[in-house]
């Protein structure tokens, strides 16, 4: 049994991670930490865990000491010292924040107004979407766990870009996220009466996930990809649906694209290319690590339309982090994250 | 006082129309009809109207006889005979269905699998978006009240297309609608446990509003416009948000586009170009006849992003129908539809 | 036209009041105030009001100076000075807070931890449920506008208690409120992901509306009434449903109770005793000033079950305040508050 | 591994049962059936199961043949023949319907308008709430799995009634259920726009779960118990909260009641008596087999208030059925149903 710990366990991604780790067959949750709630049992903050996980929140240092693998679910900038401490102590580190996602320090500076304090850490770090970069993850020490939106986009677009059937400029990504994506902190825009029966776009073309999306898609395509990315807030708890619009290259037959998707994902446990006629829905992946994909072609405008859905807190955060841990430790990739989405 | 009647009063658009007409200062609701509920008071189907509107549902003929202006909220194909009867009887006819929206009989046949039974009626009919075609509406006998999605799209894109600042091909329209758009009839996809905490695209690139959208945009642009239109179902009762992506022409300065929008809508009572930094939200127009618009430009991809919101049942149906009636009868255009959207 | 002003206009009750007053036929909104947003237009806080009500928030003193009638929607304790200033200046004052609801200074002290600073004001004040105390309201200077829960309870129980068909002890009130009842300030319990898909009781048998409920019911019954009051939070924006359980006196025939209710409310514009078999639903009174009531009797336990629904922000706050104003000024009682609830 | 089958697998309780059984460590899902969808894979009806459970729906007979334990999730009346067939074939039978819940044929006839076709089956049948009747369940052949409301009520009231600290007459049960309780079939009252932002009581004092509740409580109390039961429909997918009001006997100290509850449930895996000050919430048990309980006393009226929550589809249906199966087969009682409720 590996000893796992979560730093920032009282945030939404943190507590979801704890919940999943508690049922992982090869892991013990050895320690958790929280700056805001140090000294309190986790179940005091989340009564859903009463009698199930009454572990006391300690400090980050205590977590690093006690564990073989450390997950951090922190605001950007704050994971760097922890990562350095883990590397020094010979522990694996999986960062659910943004500090190990971008290759370029310039991108990080521009979008997050932060500096890479330990550039050398990025040599032992990897960007962790297993379905795209599985081979690179095994053996690494630090995993930059991807953002929720970038996960849904990368899985949705990889086959088309890798096969080169679409143009790489002017990709439109219209994404919709549930409110847990905004985190645990109450704000005006997440206050129930403001958010319920509401729907809006936010940070149109200025969201921080844009450079991460372009970085991943460019790697996959083998050339520079540009996207226009507009996220929206949906009045539901969990889930991301990304609707993406790409220009088919002139010679490409619509029919061949579906075959491409089915083929590229045929061995993946967590990606489902849905049968023709079955649209994807965020509810169909809720509380699971699945990513469902459906594609359409608009013949009269020659656009390829790709829809992909994930649970933003699982495949978009805690579930994918565990999937990465499974790779690092040589566990079965589906261990602890093979939950079946409930039908309702 | 004009005598108004509603055919199909027990559907969602119908009952909303009745509700608004009951408070119109220059109208009496003289008669209503329903095939499914003939002989029953409207308040038996909608207890919210108990003691407010206990009118008995009669037949379509009774409505035509009793009224100066007849509204029909019927499935497509069924308004044609009613329209003919109204014209013969010298009554005004406002169709909330699809039978008088498309200019081309071929489009109607292709998308609705129906024929225009009385081609001559289309000579006295007009497509009723007052903000775009006000001059054409006055004096007409029949109004084809626009679809909900096309209204949100046309109002959102008119200034850019009319001014010619964007290209007319490959416009992407990612639209989201509340569930009332699906009507009153219970179905699997609108069953609460299926629809709540869910989000999905439907009829991607095959929705019947596509030709109506292209027809209107082409008129406005003065050249053929093509769009890719993907609607989505939001788990809320009311509202449409359309997020639209257009290619800015090379020479166009992003800054000038906002000025364009503000200028073209400066005298419109129901269109609000929101100040920079204030995103539109379906909740801000709920239960009102407003259309709110916000625009963004993505400089790195040179796309113009337009977001527009309406209440699908008011500006997208009953409210716009009354606005058209006001034009036909020379009432003040805002009469009966100047409701202020509640803040929550 | 009377000049009306709202102190605390940026809270939920305040902004709803402004929205309704803007469409009142005999009132102008002359001034509004807000401590938190002084100097800002109301539409900056509520974009739904953009171009509709861009009045700048001023100070409470400015409102008193400018207006004939002053509404205050403030936390308890803060209305007393305002009330005194209004009385001195000869203005009418309608308090949506709790400072003029309780007759007994001891109750006020016990439940609100506050003192009555100006006991003499209570001589010119009245508790404003028009359907119960209409005659007492006319001519008064200060109105204590009732709490939302007490309104739903008092209207639901008046006929049974007034006629003396039920016992006055051990009345059980199980009430459910939408989230706007908790106000505009974001908190953990009103954060969307905490509140959505959730349902809970709160302040069981300790809610501050308990003494107000018992005071009103005791007046109506002519003897001391005791209740157990348990409120719950519903994941919807608006509405209160109170389900109330009372012991029928032995001799009372169930059938006669319905007749009682119908008779006592037959002339009321805003109370609807629903026909047998038609249950009440918060949706049927949404955005309206109606209170709907349905009664049942459980013969095998001899309990009378009364269900009543209101919109907590209208009949439970802003609408009833305007109804009281209409009485004070001799307007038609339904002026400005005859909105028809939308069917969805 | 036991071979399990589900008759009526495409209803909501049925599909939830399949989902849970698929992850049970000692069970294989050997066959499922559906009258409406015979011949179709389950994943065609529920795309959430695509690639996870593509088993074809067969006939009830095929299920009985193939399995050691047969679950039936059918409308009342339809389980009797299946039960008889199972008994004849030596299979265990767990009925999620109402055919084996009531001891009295008269009650069954009165409330369900049905006859017990095989009275002898009731001799080998047991009413399955493990926490109350564990000893009786082991060794039985047929289990009548309790209704959702009765489960929440029985667990909430057992300690008080068993200890005799409350009176047994005039118990008030105000219960609230999520919409999945109404089943999979779309109806007007479960149509999203009717149900969303709505809240109502239904079947006040006439719901079929009333005799089942009184039967169980009477057994526990050792004397006849009468209740007034009023269910309500909440606009959420899952969960039941029952708020219950009981008269404390004169001599009973409020303080002692909490100790009673804690003591009686101290060894139960699935019942959590929450700490003082921590209210129960349906969200805290969602997707789990837990029942959370909190109690209050209203000293001024001497009422005991008990609130209990369950997930209506798990502890109120599929989870409890599996718990019963675990008892019948000698598995660990928590096997396959130890899911941790997600925090959001």
Image (cartoon, coloured by chain):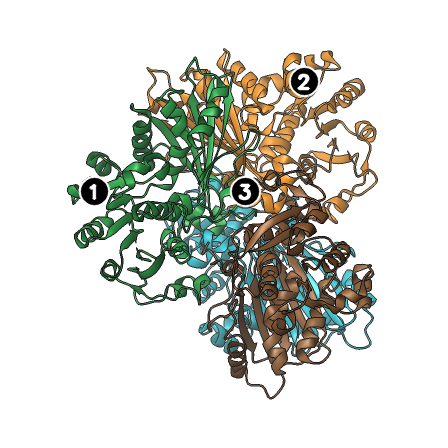
Chain colours: A brown, B cyan, C orange, D green
**Which image quarter holds the C terminus of chain B?**
top right
The chain identifier of the residue carrying mark 1 reads D
Above or below for A122 versus D331: below
Name the disc covering residue C140, or none.
2
Q: Secondary structure at mark 3?
A: helix
Q: Which mark is residue A48?
A: 3
Q: In the figure, B216 relative to C19: above or below?
A: below
- Specify the subunit that label 3 lies on: A
Mark 2 vs mark 3: in front: 3
Expressed as whole percent of the image width and height from the top left, the position of residue C118 reads 75, 14
Above or below, B221 relative to B7 = below
Image-based side of D179 in relation to A121, left or right = left
- Residue B233 pos. (x, y %): 54, 60
Instruction: Tell me which chain the residue with mark 2 is part of.
Output: C
State how far apart marks 3 and 1 are (Cα): 37 Å
Secondary structure type for disc 2:
loop
Q: Secondary structure at mark 1?
A: loop
Task: Tell me which corner region of the image, top left, top right, bottom left or bottom right, holds residue B40.
Answer: top left
- Residue, x 59% and y 24% (percent of image)? C209
Q: Examine the image and state in which quarter residue D115 appears.
A: top left
**Is residue D214 toward the left or the right of residue B65 in the image?**
left
Label 2 – label 3 distance at C-alpha: 51 Å
Work out whether disc 2 and disc 1 sit on a shared chain: no
Residue A256, given in percent of the width and then of the height, sits at 53, 83
Give the numbered dot on residue D124: 1
Q: Are marks 3 and 1 on the same chain?
A: no
C16 and B319: which one is in front?
Answer: C16
Where is C289 relative to A163, above or below? Answer: above
Residue positioned 50% across, 75% down in the render: A266
């Amino acid at each position: 049994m590996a000893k796992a710990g979560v730093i920032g366990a009282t945030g939404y991604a943190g507590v979801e991670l704890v919940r999943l780790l508690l049922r992982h067959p090869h892991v013990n949750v050895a320690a958790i930490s929280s700056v805001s709630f140090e000294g309190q049992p986790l179940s005091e903050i989340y009564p859903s865990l009463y009698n199930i996980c009454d572990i006391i929140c300690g400090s980050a240092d205590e977590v690093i000491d006690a564990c073989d693998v450390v997950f951090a679910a922190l605001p950007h900038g704050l994971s760097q010292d922890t990562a350095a401490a883990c590397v020094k102590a010979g522990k694996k580190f999986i960062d659910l924040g943004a500090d190990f996602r971008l290759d370029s320090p310039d991108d990080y500076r521009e979008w997050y107004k932060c500096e890479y304090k330990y550039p050398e850490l990025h040599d032992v770090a990897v960007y962790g979407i297993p379905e795209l970069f599985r081979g690179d993850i095994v053996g690494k020490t630090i995993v930059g766990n991807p953002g929720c939106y970038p996960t849904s986009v990368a899985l949705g677009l990889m086959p088309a870009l890798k096969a080169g059937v679409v143009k790489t400029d002017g990709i439109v990504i219209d994404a919709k996220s549930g409110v847990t994506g905004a985190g645990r902190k109450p704000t005006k825009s997440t206050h129930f009466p403001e958010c319920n029966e509401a729907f809006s776009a936010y940070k149109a073309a200025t969201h921080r996930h844009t450079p991460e999306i372009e970085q991943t898609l460019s790697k996959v395509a083998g050339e520079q990809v540009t996207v226009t990315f507009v996220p929206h807030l949906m009045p539901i708890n969990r889930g991301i649906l990304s609707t993406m619009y790409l220009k088919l290259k002139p010679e490409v037959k619509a029919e061949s694209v579906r075959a491409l998707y089915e083929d590229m994902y045929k061995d993946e446990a967590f990606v489902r290319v849905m049968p023709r006629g079955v649209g994807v829905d965020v509810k169909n992946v809720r509380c699971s690590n699945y990513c469902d994909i459906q594609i359409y072609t608009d013949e009269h405008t020659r656009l390829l339309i790709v829809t992909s859905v994930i649970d933003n807190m699982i495949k978009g955060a805690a579930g994918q982090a565990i999937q990465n841990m499974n790779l690092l430790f040589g566990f079965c990739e589906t261990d602890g994250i093979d939950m079946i989405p409930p039908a309702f």
